[in-house]
Amino acid sequence: MKNRILLGTGNAGKIKEMRFYLKHFNIFQTFETLTPSDFKHLSEPIEDGTTFEANAKLKSNFFYGATNLLSLSDDSGLMIDKLNGYPGIKTARVAKDLGGEQKVIDYIFSKFENEPQLKATFHCSIALIGKDKKLICSGKVQGSIIPTHRGDRGFGYDPYFIPENNSKTFAEMAVEEKMILSHRFNAFKILANQIL
């Protein structure tokens, strides 16, 4: 029977990136990758941790407990320097509450109307949990957010985020270019080093 690993998210963008990084770093190449949608009645846990690391661990523990499969989950978010890290671990929830990422960006820039861009950090924590594994790794990328949507690739806040030493948003970049500059790449690189 083929070994299997569960990617603990319902976010299609994250699933695509996780599969890319598992292949890129040659992690679990012989494993079949599954997602929660492959299981009937498998819900997602309430993310009530106080840090990205805690939420990633909470999700992987939940999926491992529900399926007995090696589970890989992440928690990631956008942190604005001038807003003391807001929206941070509530990034996805804030977007849902306000009606989408553009509404969040509009809200942020309403506080800084004369700023063409704001310094920000994308953070990602990933947790790998199974019978014999318990690893938690974090990565980040620094840059700036802009008030207007640019680019049609990526997902979430990619059209608003410009990494340091670049002029393009993540959503304006070729897919692989974005992948190797991202916060998720940096977290998976650490994970690969710990596993291999």
Image: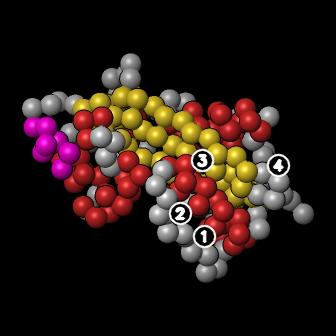
Q: Closer to the N terminus: mark 2 or mark 1?
A: 2
Amino acid residing under circle 3: Ile
Give percent across and percent down for residue 106.
18, 48
Instruction: Compare residues 74 and 35 and report the one nearer the observer.
Output: 74
Q: Amino acid at mark 4?
A: Thr
Residue positioned 42% across, 38% down in the render: 122
- At 55% from the left and 49% from the top, the residue drawn is 53
Provide the residue designation for mark 2.
10
- Near-viewer residue (112 or 160): 112
Please tell me whether mark 4 or mark 3 is closer to you in this view. 3
Instruction: Name the element at disc 4.
Output: loop
| Numbered label attached to residue 30 | 4
Residue 158 in view (yes/no): yes
Check contact, mark 4 vs mark 1: CB within 8 A.
no
Three-letter amino acid code at disc 1?
Ser
Which mark sits nearer the N-terminus, 3 or 2?
Answer: 2
Which residue appears farthest toward the bottom when viewing the image?
41
- 136 to 185, vertically: above or below: below
Q: Residue tagged by mark 3?
A: 126
Left or right placement of residue 56 versus residue 82 in this view: right
Distance between the alpha carbons at the discs numbered 3 and 1:
20 Å
Q: Nearer the viewer, mark 3 or mark 2?
A: 3
In this picture, residue 57 sits left or right of residue 145: right
Above or below for 147 versus 56: above
| Among the two numbered marks 4 and 2 on one chain, the one whose residue lies closer to the N terminus | 2
Q: Is residue 110 magenta?
A: yes
Q: Is residue 177 magenta?
A: no
Q: Do labels 2 and 1 touch, CB within 8 Å?
A: yes
Quadrant location of the N terminus in the rendered image: bottom right
CA neighbours of label 2 inside 10 A, class few (<14), some (14 to 19), many (20+): few
Q: At 76% across and 57% down in the image, what residue appears?
A: 130
